[in-house]
Image (cartoon, rainbow, N blue to C red):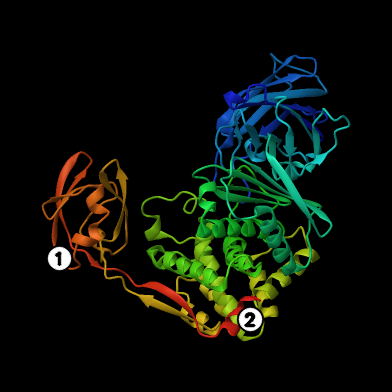
Amino acid sequence: MTIIYKISIPEPHTHYVKVSLELERVANAKNMTFFMPAWSPGSYLVREYSRHIRGLRASSDKGARLFVKQTDKNHYFVDFDHPEFKSDCKNFVIDYEIYCNELTVRTAHVDTTHAFLHGPAVFLGVSDVEMKDLEVHLDFPPLWSHVSTTLKDISKQREKFIYSAKNFDELLDSPIEIGCQETDGFMFDRKEHWWIYWGALPPMKWNLKEDIKKIVETVAAVTGETPYEKYMFMAHFAPGLYGGLEHADSTVLAYDPFKMVERKGYLDWLSLVAHEYFHVWNVKRIRPKALGPFDYSKENYTNLLWLSEGMTVFMDELLVARSGLSTLSEYLEQQKNNINRMLATPGRKFHSLEESSFNAWIKLYRPDENSVNSTVSYYLKGGLVFFVLNAWMAKEGKSVDDFIKALWSDYKARPQTGLEDEEVFKILETVASKKIAQNFSHLVSTTDELPLDEAAKLCGLEIIYEQSPKPWTGMDVRYDGGRVIVDKVYLDGPAMKEGLNVGDELISMGGLRVLKGQWEKNSEWLNSGTHYETLVARHGRLHQLSLTPGSSPRAVKEIKVLDETQAKLSLGLK
């Protein structure tokens, strides 16, 4: 079925986009059903995009009204045979408005400065019909000067903006940026690579385009080829933003520009760029079988997100270092922070990587105050499990790069198939050994602690631990003005043992009033092992409790280089 989507943005300040679908009725069909995607590939949460639809209606190409009924949260039933609205029309139109006012990489955002159209949040599809040779016609304010998208430009006139997609999957996977965004680019592998961004950047000493180019060169070298005709890096810069979402031949990035001024923040930005670009191979092509073809109406479950995201996390910071954009010491500092974050996650003792992947829809993307105690991120632990795998393979003179190349060869041999769980380990066995594959499978499927110390030593490194002398309360807090509110309570920590709850307001400890200023300096007046009578406000009532701070849990102080040559060789660094 061929469909023409007409997009109009007459009043961007209202955040509404007008969408029309012009299409042909399926032969002899008495009715047809349309659907709005409920989620976005790469972001595993049902987001109910249909909640932003307003005024959906259907009419024949002659303007006669057709009967439309919403049958569930995201499906719309068009009846050509309804007694009151019966029609023998061959062509018809679906019209609706969609509200676009959420600035993330997985939603749509329209205001007076630009329009960012994220496909799943904008376009209706047709159920049980093969949608192909789709067209998108854009109409937007005349002061906007650019359209950036990887959709094919088929406009025959300069003042027209008409694009095509081979099918519905490609349409949803091709974000569209419209406005006065900055555009630049470079050539690599005889292909266009566009650098596009919306928002303001403060003065900084980094050359973003050149550094992105270095990352492209380094990432592409892993497989030795670029499987796209052109590629776009689309970025949104505004305070408080962070995120990235991969597409087959583009990525959308969101970042706080003020964090990029400092070295650490800039390295985090570069890692985000490398992460999303690496997804060109891992996820958009090498993928779990469950992730394509997609069912956009409900959850698509898989145990393999530790492969899709964990391997990508392991590679992103490493690829920045291989690009010469960070040093070995900076890379090891990042790994120190990653290990400490996992050590501070008691949920790793209850949730395997496979379980974390399968439950992404209800856990990782829907965190609550107890998430730290019940689950572990397949991003965080997934990256570290590949650090261990790489160390094991380095002992045999190989690396995760060899595993990636084998996965890539498998993909090219059967590009439409996708991977079953056991196939991943079989491929690893052919590249490494049966023992390594079995041990790796064990780490993925159980909650056993990762042998990070062993892995470090195999790479010529040593993990040095420390125990902070500061008293540990076993809770995190947030501030509401000057008030101190318990925000997180850690499993088996002092706060949990004494019955403090998330949401409690700390009123006093040891007879002293507790406000923001005092709590920020609590290490100066709290003592480990000392009993403090504690008064909290909970649901409008006062409760007398007690709290005895303990010793801080063990954390990584540094990752020490014992043999620099061995470390660089195992990590693929120059």
In the rendered view, does 125 fall on the left or right side of 520? right
**Which residue is under mark 2?**
569
Indicate the position of residue 398 as horizontal and vertical percent values. Answer: 67, 81
**Which residue is under mark 1?**
530
Q: Nearer the viewer, residue 513 or 524?
A: 524
The quadrant in which residue 433 appears is: bottom right
- In the displayed structure, 566 sits above or below 58; it is below
Indicate the position of residue 261 as horizontal and vertical percent values. Answer: 53, 52
- Quadrant of image for the C terminus: bottom right
Asked if one can make out residue 39 in the rendered structure from this viewpoint, the answer is no
- CA separation, marks 1 and 2? 49 Å
Q: Amino acid at mark 2?
A: Leu
Give the residue drawn at x 69%, y 34%.
178
Dot 1 or dot 2, earlier in sequence: 1
Q: Residues within 10 Å of mark 2 (few under 14, many from 20)?
A: some
Q: Residues within 10 Å of mark 1 (few under 14, many from 20)?
A: few
Q: Nearer the viewer, residue 69 or 156?
A: 156
The quadrant in which residue 140 appears is: top right
Q: Amino acid at mark 1?
A: Thr
- In the displayed structure, 479 sits above or below 403; it is above
Indicate the position of residue 133 as horizontal and vertical percent values. Answer: 83, 39
In the rendered view, does 473 fall on the left or right side of 129? left
Indicate the position of residue 108 as horizontal and vertical percent values. Answer: 61, 36
Asked if one can make out residue 249 in the rendered structure from this viewpoint, the answer is yes
- In the displayed structure, 311 sits above or below 371; it is below
Give the structural element (helix, strand or loop) at label 2.
helix
Give the structural element (helix, strand or loop) at label 1.
loop
Q: Residue furthest right?
A: 156
